[in-house]
Image (cartoon, rainbow, N blue to C red):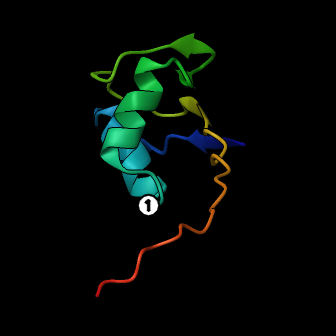
Amino acid sequence: MIKKLIVPKEKVGIRIDKVIGEEFSDLSRNTIQRLIEEKKIVVNDSIIKSSYKCKAGDEILIEEDKPKEIELKPEHLAKCK
């Protein structure tokens, strides 16, 4: 899933991780940092660093990881005597 954000003029000069965190509360700062390192967050079709400071009108695209499917299996527990 890709999220898109156009930076408003009120967010000019603010670090990208903070702007994204404020706009998308479901993404933690750690997740945002990891996505930047993995080049899954781009600004105006360019790869950026986490220190990037936003400019008015920047188009931020965020490629989110798909949740991993897990399979739960029951575990046999021995009864205590």
* Image: 54 above or below 70: above
In this picture, residue 30 sits left or right of residue 1: left
Q: Residue 45 in the image: state x and y as whole percent.
A: 63, 15
Image quadrant in which you'd find residue 16: top left
Image quadrant in which you'd find residue 78: bottom left
Q: Residue 60 in the image: state x and y as whole percent.
A: 56, 32
Circle 1: element type: loop
Look at mark 1 in the image and give the residue it sits on: 25
Residue at the right extreme of this rendering: 1
The answer to which of 76 and 50 lies nearer the viewer is 76
Residue at 28% across, 88% down: 81
Residue at 38% across, 55% down: 22
* Image: 45 above or below 63: above
Image quadrant in which you'd find residue 18: top left
How many labels sit on residues? 1
Q: Residues within 10 Å of mark 1 (few under 14, many from 20)?
A: few
Residue 11 seen in render = no
In this picture, residue 15 sits left or right of residue 25: left
